[in-house]
Amino acid sequence: MNLQDLKFLIYLLDDEDPNVYNDVSKKIVEAGKPALSALEDALGVAGMDTLLEERLEWVINRIQYTTLLGSFKDWLYAIDENKTPDLLKGCSLIASYQYPDLDQDWIKRKLNRIYQDLSYTVSTLQTGLKSVSVFNRVLFDTHDFSTPTSPVLEPNSFFINRVLGARCGHPIVLSIIYLILARRLGLRVHGVNFGSNLLLAYPKRVSEKKRKQLVSLEDQFMHSVKFYIDPAKKGTIYMPREINTYLQREEIPLRAAHFTPCLDVEIIKCLVMRLADVYSNQKMFEEERDMKAIAQLMEEYIREKSFIA
């Protein structure tokens, strides 16, 4: 679409006929990212025309969302090709839903500062418990990361740029930050999906011979993980027996997912679904639908690749 045609369509956006508006807005959204500059220029001169301003903002939002969906597909394909999924990229994509001009370099600088402090004190030569204890002290005491105290969750608690800036965020984002940094340090930590909660697990080293002898699910559970880490509680450490007691008390059946590593795609999907719930509670239904559509994209990928979610 050339610029002259695009400007003409933008001119028609405030048409009182809803059929004209629907047709025009659809065509502009289909024009995609190249239309953003002209739309933003028009928004800057919309003045007191509230209707036009609202419609311009909606069209801009839809184009940005469509672009984001494309970026998520690229992210999934990158996982396929590289075999090393970029958890930070997935988390940043979610943040760019609310912050389209997200500064990726700023996020990396923030994480690098924390990593530098960690690298001075955490050593892979230490025992697992020791290295994680030191890690927790740096992240939760020195850098003072925490979860929100208010029972009412806000969307900003799910966006990594806001969490890094405020040093406060939803437990799943803290878990993601923890996991990103732990991987860079070479710590043997992975995510474990407990449904409403994402814990981190420090696995045991088990020989192949011993692994074949672990027949029952409970034996596999007890011999797979050395201890669990809960970033929502400043890195509190739980032993497998404590987790097992909790599951029995809550009458939650033990599943392989409680001790086997979950995919990075699953972690981001979990983040998206929690965010969708927050949007729903705040009656932001379009945003809720957007998040569910992104989650569905990841679910389809998991099923297509025959992964177990």
Image (cartoon, rainbow, N blue to C red):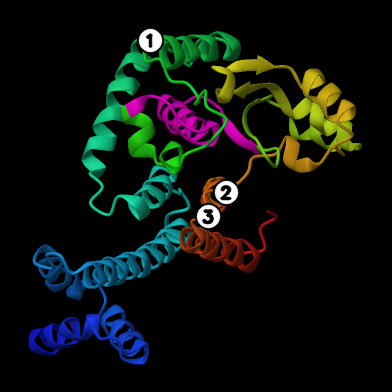
Circle 2: is it few (<14), some (14-19), or many (20+) Cα within 10 Å?
A: some
Residues at marks 2 and 1 touching, judged by CB atoms closer than 8 Å: no
Give 175 or 264, whichever is nearer the viewer: 175
Q: Percent from the top left, x then y, of residue 103?
A: 22, 44
Q: Percent from the top left, x then y, of residue 52?
A: 22, 73
Residue underneath mark 3: 283
Q: Mark 2 to mark 1: distance in Å? A: 34 Å
Circle 3: is it few (<14), some (14-19), or many (20+) Cα within 10 Å?
A: few
Q: Percent from the top left, x then y, of residue 105?
A: 22, 40
Residue drawn at (60%, 67%) of the image: 300
Vertical placement of residue 98 versus 194, above or below: below
Give 187 or 268, whichever is nearer the viewer: 268
Q: Mark 2 to mark 3: distance in Å? A: 5 Å
Vertical placement of residue 185 versus 213, above or below: above
The earlier-in-sequence mark between 2 and 1 is 1
Q: Is residue 227 left or right of residue 187?
A: right
Residue 281 disc label: 2
Residue 142 disc label: 1
Determine the secondary structure under disc 3. loop
**Residue 17 shows in the view:** yes
